[in-house]
């Protein structure tokens, strides 16, 4: 397969260079070719989106919703194909990838329904014979910049609300998810989305991303990716006074209290930390354990690791596959090397396949203090640091000792501790006896502190981002 840009309804092969994509589960296998866009391609996409904005914005919500339903059906028919492609492109286990595509289908249907729901309110006027009301209107043209770790769900949780709200889009996916992005755009085209409503430009973030954010006539940017890039984008958008949303990194903590049921807790913790090879912004990476249960907990986590199978992402039994790319491999491996030097290894997984790929065995470490790089930096790999806590108060303090604030969990049977955690944990998504990952599509998604720029995605929160409010008044 080859990537293509989709601009103004035309499929184009850009000429800014090419990159061969190898399967991270089996480096001998070529999955396809990525053709990089030039700055001019982005400019063309900007013009196409601008041209299409008026007619798309004026279409009824119901008509836009019908198109999203058709896209959902088209995607569902090709679920297997899309999931397999994504799994081969970025290494997410096929079973998880199928669930992710299904989530994309659900998101499309959820936002399709928004086309016929209330989008404003009547506000009583102090004047006689006056109708005063508010109404959400489209922003215009929005730029979407997406990461590789959820190659289907994250683009769709931006595209679906952006489109239903009447915006046209320029979408720049991550390099390591560009084949999947091309396939998704083909599905949108097949379903009959009008020309120029969605424009896909593929290539390097620092080349085309910059033009998109700094130069194009756009009305908003929704970005998901690293905190380093997100902060730059936020500053550029603030300077231009355009709306922005930056969903960024995490270093998510799970607290295990002395009354936690370890048989139930450990499988949930391992799933939160190691599925998708720990490459979720909401992955559990710090586990804070009450000292009273430290030894039984170590025993339980060593035992639990026996069910964690690392193998080729296309193996339906794979618990986790490889990390997504060579860059990821070297970054995560450097943290593992640091752990071998500075920490004690509690348990480490093994690799269960023969091919050469970017495999990093899942690892649990202890013996580093709360300010250590391993505990403070986002590793974005299958890595857990364990921290002991004297009591509940210290556990909360450790949980909050991070520049990030995306998600956090507590495992307890104590209602008082559960509620205090929900109140006191500094994170946008807080959960009791559940993974730090896995927030449902109809609920707001986003973080506090350096994890997010204070807006939320998913659910009705996304409608706030992709619209602006007009206050209307009429004297009759
Ligand atoms: P990244 O920041 O390297 O890239 C994200 C996107 O930004 C890519 O499309 C990339 O090409 C583009 N980009 C890079 N430089 C750019 C620039 N100068 N201008 C414009 N665009 C540019 O992140 P990544 O490695 O793709 O993804 C991993 C990161 O994403 C992790 O930090 C993870 O926590 C985060 N993430 C956050 C969430 C969330 O909702 N909070 C969800 C998933 C991933």
Image: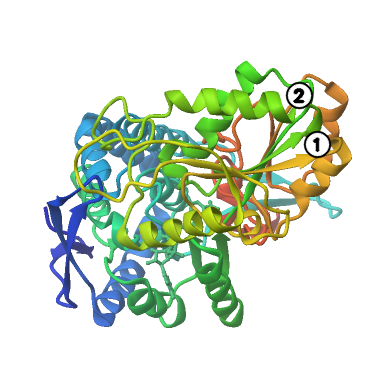
Alpha carbons under labels 2 and 1: distance apart: 10 Å
Q: Quadrant of residue 349?
A: top left
Q: Quadrant of residue 306?
A: top left
Ligand 1 location (quadrant): bottom left
Packing grade of label 1 (10 A; few <14, some 14-19, many >=20) is: many
Up/down of 435 relative to 464, above or below:
above
SS assignment at label 2 = loop
Q: Is 101 displayed left or right of 290 in the figure?
A: left
Packing grade of label 2 (10 A; few <14, some 14-19, many >=20) is: many
Q: Which mark is residue 29?
A: none
Is label 2 or label 1 in front? 2
Q: Are marks 2 and 1 in contact (CB under 8 Å)?
A: yes
**Most foreground residue, 81 or 394:** 394
Mark 1, ligand 1, within 8 Å: the answer is no
- Here the colouring is rainbow
Q: Quick check: can you spot residue 260? A: yes
Residue to which mark 2 is pinned: 412
Where residue 358 appears, as percent x and y from the top left, is 30, 51
């Amino acid at each position: 397969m080859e990537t293509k840009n989709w601009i103004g309804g035309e499929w184009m092969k850009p000429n800014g260079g090419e990159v061969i994509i190898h399967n991270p589960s089996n480096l001998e296998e070529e999955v396809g070719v990525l053709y990089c866009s030039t700055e001019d391609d982005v400019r063309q996409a900007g013009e196409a989106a601008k041209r299409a904005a008026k007619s798309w914005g004026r279409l009824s919500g119901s008509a836009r919703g019908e198109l999203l339903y058709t896209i959902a059906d088209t995607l569902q028919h090709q679920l297997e194909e899309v999931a397999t492609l994504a799994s081969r492109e970025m290494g997410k286990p096929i079973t998880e990838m199928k669930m992710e595509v299904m989530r994309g289908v659900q998101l499309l249907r959820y936002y399709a329904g928004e086309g016929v729901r209330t989008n404003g309110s009547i506000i009583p006027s102090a004047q006689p014979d006056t109708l005063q009301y508010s109404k959400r209107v489209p922003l215009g043209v929005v730029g979407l910049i997406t990461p590789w770790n959820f190659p289907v769900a994250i683009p769709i949780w931006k595209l679906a609300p952006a489109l239903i709200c009447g915006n046209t889009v320029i979408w720049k996916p991550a390099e390591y998810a560009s084949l999947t992005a091309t396939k998704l755009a083909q599905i949108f085209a097949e379903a009959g989305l009008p020309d120029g409503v969605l424009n896909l430009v593929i290539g390097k973030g620092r080349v085309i991303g910059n033009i998109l954010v700094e130069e194009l006539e756009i009305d908003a940017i929704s970005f998901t990716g690293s905190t380093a890039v997100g902060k730059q984008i936020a500053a550029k958008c603030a300077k231009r006074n355009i709306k922005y949303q930056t969903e960024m990194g995490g270093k998510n903590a799970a607290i295990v209290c002395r009354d936690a049921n370890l048989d139930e807790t450990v499988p949930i913790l391992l799933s939160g930390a190691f599925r998708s090879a720990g490459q979720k912004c909401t992955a559990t990476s710090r586990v804070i354990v009450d000292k009273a249960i430290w030894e039984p907990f170590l025993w339980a986590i060593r035992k639990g690791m026996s069910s964690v199978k690392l193998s080729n992402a296309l193996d339906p039994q794979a618990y986790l596959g490889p990390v997504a790319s060579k860059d990821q491999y070297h970054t995560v491996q450097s943290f593992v090397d640091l752990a071998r030097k500075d920490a004690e290894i509690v348990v480490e997984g093994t690799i269960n396949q023969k091919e050469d790929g970017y495999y990093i065995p899942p690892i649990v470490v202890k013996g580093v203090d709360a300010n250590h790089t391993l505990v403070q930096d986002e590793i974005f790999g299958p890595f857990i640091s364990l921290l002991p806590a004297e009591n509940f108060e210290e556990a909360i303090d450790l949980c909050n000792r991070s520049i990030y604030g995306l998600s956090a969990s507590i495992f307890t049977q104590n209602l008082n501790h559960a509620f205090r955690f929900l109140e006191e944990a500094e994170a946008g998504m807080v959960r009791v006896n559940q993974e730090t990952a896995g927030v449902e599509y109809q609920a707001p998604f986003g973080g506090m502190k350096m994890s997010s720029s204070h807006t939320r995605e998913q659910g009705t929160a996304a409608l706030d981002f992709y619209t602006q409010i007009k206050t209307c008044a009429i004297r009759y």
